[in-house]
Amino acid sequence: MSLISITDASKDFGVRTLFKNLELHIKKNERLGLIGPNGSGKSTLLKVIAGLEPLLNGERTCSPALKISLVGQENTLDKNITVMEEVLKGCKKKSDLLIRFRKLTEKISSNSKDKSLLKELGYLSELMDNTNAWNLEQQCKEILRRLGIKDTGRTIKELSGGFQKRVELASALISNPDVLLLDEPTNHLDVSSIQWLQGWLEKYKGALVLITHDRYFLEKVTTRMIEIDNGKIYKYSANYSNYLQLKLVQNTSEKSTNKKFRAILKKELNWLKKGPKARSTKQKARVQRITNLQSQQPLESEKNLELNSISNRIGKKAIDVENLSITINHKKILKDFSYNFTPNDRVGIIGHNGSGKTSLLDVLAGKRKPTSGKIEFGQTIAIGYLDQHTNELSIGKGINRRVIDFIKEAGPIININEKKITASQLLEKFLFHPSEQYSKIEKLSGGEKRRLTLCKMLINAPNILLLDEPTNDLDIQTLSVLEDFLEDFKGCVIIASHDRYFLDRTINKIFNFEQGELKRYDGNYSSFQENKRSNTLRKTLPYESKDYSLNKKSSRKNISLSSEATKKSKNIKELRKISFKEKRELDQLDKEIPMLENRKLEVEKSISENFSDQNVVRLSHELANITEKIKVLEERWLILSDLAK
C-alpha cells in the first residue's frame, strides 16, 4: 500500500515544463533517490510530494494522519527560539507525553491513593515506552552533537546558515516521521557527520526520498531512482551504481545514442565498482582517458557541460608557505604550517566544520591575512577561487544582474585557449540556453549559480584553483565533467571538500586538520580512510605495527599496500610464526581468491552485454557481493602471508 500517490501529474515553471504525466507511488520503507540536472525540478517535485507545491494537472493523495518531514533548501526555522526548543518542535508527541507524565507524577505525589491517577500513569508509561520518550532531551542532544552542535541554548538567529540547516535536519530526524524528504542534506556537513547520517538513514524505518550530489551517500542509502531530465521522468529499481548500468544499457540500445554521455556513464560506473584499495592508487594510473569524450559531440537533446583544460602556463613555483598561523576570534585554528605547493599538486583539505578549511583558502587567495608566517607566490600564477557560498552572486548587486551581464563584465569578446567567443556562446557551453541568459541571477537555482560562478572564474584562465566545497548544489552530471576537467588541468588544485567521492576522483594527497595542525597523508580519500582503519586495527592487535606491505616474492603480487608495510611485517614475524591451522587457511585462500576473481570477471562481462533490466540488477548485486568478499579475504590473506614469511 502506498503512503503517498501522485498520478497523471504535470508541473511547469513559467514557460518550462518540469515534468508531465508523472506516476509516483511512495511505499513504506521506500528508499528513493531523485536525480537530474540543476534546474530540472527535483526540489519542486520534493515539495509536491510534501504537499507544499500545487500541481498544474494530476492528483496527490495520502492519509491525513501521515507524518511528513521536509528538510528543503529554504530556511523555515523560528529565529527567536533556542536550538533545543526548535528540535523539540519536531517531536511534539513525545514532548507532550513527557510534560503529561511530569504533571501526573506531581498530582500523584500529593494524592497517592487515587487509583484513577495510578491507572493513568500506567497507561502513560506504556505510551512512553512505545515511543521511546523517556530520554527525549538526551536523544535531541545526541543527534545535535553528531551534527556538530553542542550549545543547545543558543537562539537560532545566533547561528550561521549552515548550522541552522543542521538544526532543521536534527528536528526532522528526532521526529521520526513516516516519510522523510531531504534536499541536499550533506551540504554544510563535515565527513564524520555525513557518515553518521548515512548510518542513521540505513536504520531508519520510514520512507525516504532524497536529493543529493554525494554519490557514495546515494549508493549506500537508496534502492530506487527517479531521474528528471528535459521534462521527462525515468524510473529505475536500482541504487546509484545499478542505475548507471541500467542507464548505460538503455542509452546503448537507442538508435540515436549519445556516445559522449555513454562514455561518462561507463567511466562513472567503472570507478564506483572499484573497491577502496583500488580507488586509492595513483590518479594517472587509475583513470584512463576515454577518447569518445573528446571526439564525439553530444546530441542537441542531451547536452553535456563541456570544459576544456583552460589555464595559463605555470612556472616551477606555485605557493610556498612557511610557519603559517591563523587565529579567528582569539582562537588559533592553525599553527606553524609549512609546505611548498607544487605546480602539479592535487591537494584535499579536510577536517570538521569550523576547523579552518575556508580560512586557509581565504589566506591563500589573499582574502584574509594570516596571524603570522610567510606566503610566497610564483611569478606566473593566476588564482581562481570558488568560494563556498557563491558570495559574488548572493549579496549586493549580484542577484539583481542578468546572467549575461555577469559574464560580460569580463568583456564582450572573451579569449578562451586563443579562440574568441562571445559571452552568449560561452554561456551556452555552460548549459545556459539563450532564452535563459537574460534572466535575473536571483531566479537561478543554487546549482545554476554555482555553474555560472565557475564559468566566470575560468574566463581568466587560472593556473591555481582554490575550490571551497565545489560540489555543493552541483548536479551529478556536472560533477563528473568537472572531475574530468580537473584531471586534465595544467596547474595546482587545492580543494576543501566533504564529498568523499569527489576527493577520491580528484586529489592525490590530503591535509587533515587535527587539533590546530595540518597533518599530511599521501593518496586520495579512500587511501586516507584505509590508513585510519589500519591504525584502528593495529590498536586491537597484541603487537606493535605500523603498516602492511608485500615483498617481491609474494604469491599474490597484484595486491599493493602503503609504504610503511615492511615495518609491520617485521614486527609480526619477530613475535610469532604461522600456526598449522593458519597455514591451511592461507592455502585455502590462495585457491578461493582466484576463483572469486574469475567469477568477478565473468559477471562484469555479462553486465556489459544487453541483458534485461532485471538481470542487470541481479548481476550487479552479485558483483558487489563478490567484490566485498574478495576485499575481506585479501585482508585476511595479507595478515597470514606476513606470518608465513
Image (cartoon, rainbow, N blue to C red):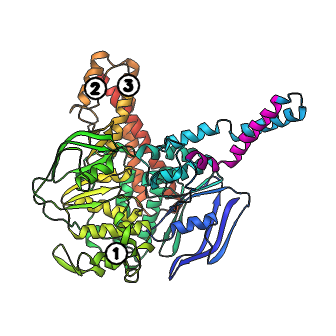
Nearer to me, 490 or 594: 490
Residue 467, above or below 193? below
- What secondary structure prevails in the magenta region? helix
Residue 443, above or below 196? below
Mark 1 and mark 3 in contact (Cβ < 8 Å)? no
Quick one: quadrant of the C terminus?
top left
- N-terminal label among 3 and 2: 3
Q: Distance between the residues labelled 3 and 2?
A: 13 Å
Q: Quadrant of residue 461 in the image?
A: bottom left
Looking at numbered disc 2 in the image, what kind of residue is underneath it?
A: Lys
The image's mark for residue 274 is none
Circle 3 residues within 10 Å: few <14, some 14–19, many ≥20? few
Residue pointed to by mark 2: 568
Q: Give the range drawn in magenta.
A: 83-109
Looking at numbered disc 3 in the image, what kind of residue is underneath it?
A: Lys
Looking at numbered disc 1 in the image, what kind of residue is underneath it?
A: Pro
Is 50 situated left or right of 619 in this image?
right
- N-terminal label among 2 and 1: 1
- Of labels 3 and 2, the one closer to you: 3
Label count reads 3
Residue pointed to by mark 3: 539
Instruction: Please tell me whether residue 557 belongs to the stretch shown in magenta.
Output: no
Instruction: Please tell me whether residue 96 belongs to the stretch shown in magenta.
Output: yes
